Image (spheres, helix red, strand yellow):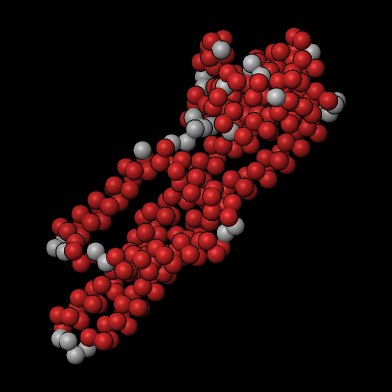
Amino acid sequence: MLLIIGAVIVIASVLGGYTLHGGNLAVLWQPTEVLIIGGAAVGSFVIANPMHTVKEVFSGLLRLLTGSPFNKSYYMDLLSLLYEVFDKSRKQGVMAIEEDIDNPEESPIFTRYPAIMKSRHLLDFITDYLRIISSGNMAPHELEGMMESEIESRQHELEEPAHAVNKIADALPGLGIVAAVLGIVITMNFLTEGPEKIGLSVAAALVGTFLGIWMGYGFVGPASIALEHTAKYELKAYECVKSAIVATVAGQAPQMAIEFGRKALPTEKRPGFQELNDHVRSK
């Protein structure tokens, strides 16, 4: 929703100000300029990035339109899931959770949290480290170091789409100049046609520069920043899991372990202590 609202504000402000200043909107309609700039941007994006990054960018942009799943409700479900696993392990022994972590799709605990089940990478992260806990006697600081290393690697993966989009945003003003230069080249053919024809052709060429800068700084650049924010909220889920698992390995009770995880969440999406407690009990 914020993406759509922001785009509407950018369009209304620029085009509205242009119109109020006496500009003619029809002059800005230059589909060939859009083809040159947009096509070159997409082509350079495909050249510069591997296929998995291209797919991640388009899926990330779709999430910007539909909304990020990493909200307060998601985090509460994540902490509730961890509490149930920790509680079962504490009451029935570590071996009791082996079936749950080996087959989460059939686990009565994991299947109660469909939002977490959809996050395949995070689900694997949880089950892998629960498996390590159940199969070994690793010290908390050793486990924490291993988890931090994986989170750092995951951070680079999650931020890759934002960096790729940002590079295209930086290139768009230059591609706008390319379209403008081509427009001036075409204008050279109209030198004998009179000032009106030449003026319209030069205006069309300058629209290319305008579109490149406007698209780069008004839409694509901000979209890359929005992708960074989405990546940040997903990373917070990993840090939440890390804090809770390390706390439970250190001997903390389940309720206290998830409190460590809760404190790792961003304040604007962090559930309150009693709010989380009520949610865990309801589950």
Residue 242 position within the rendered picture, expressed as x and y whole percent measured from the top left: 68, 30
Q: Report the residue at 34% width, 43% height from top.
A: 4
> In this picture, is 87 found above or below 216?
above
- Quarter that holds the N terminus: top left
Residue ranking furthest to the front = 106
Q: Report the residue at 85% width, 26% height from top.
A: 136
> In this picture, is 234 found above or below 41?
above
- Quarter that holds the C terminus: top right
Q: Choose top left, top right, bottom left or bottom right for residue 142.
A: top right
Of residues 260 and 30, which is closer to you in this image? 30
Residue ranking furthest to the right = 137
Residue 10 position within the rendered picture, expressed as x and y whole percent measured from the top left: 30, 51
Of residues 95 and 23, which is closer to you in this image? 95
> In this picture, is 117 found above or below 87?
below
Q: Report the residue at 51% width, 15% height from top.
A: 275
Q: Choose top left, top right, bottom left or bottom right for residue 201.
A: bottom left
In the rendered structure, the answer to whether residue 270 lies left or right of residue 90 reads left
Residue 5 position within the rendered picture, expressed as x and y whole percent measured from the top left: 32, 42
Residue 256 shows in this picture? no
Number of numbered discs visible in the structure rendering: 0
Q: Report the residue at 20% width, 76% height from top.
A: 200
Residue 213 position within the rendered picture, expressed as x and y whole percent measured from the top left: 36, 63
Residue 35 shows in this picture? yes
In the rendered structure, the answer to whether residue 174 lies left or right of residue 241 reads left
> In this picture, is 2 found above or below 201?
above
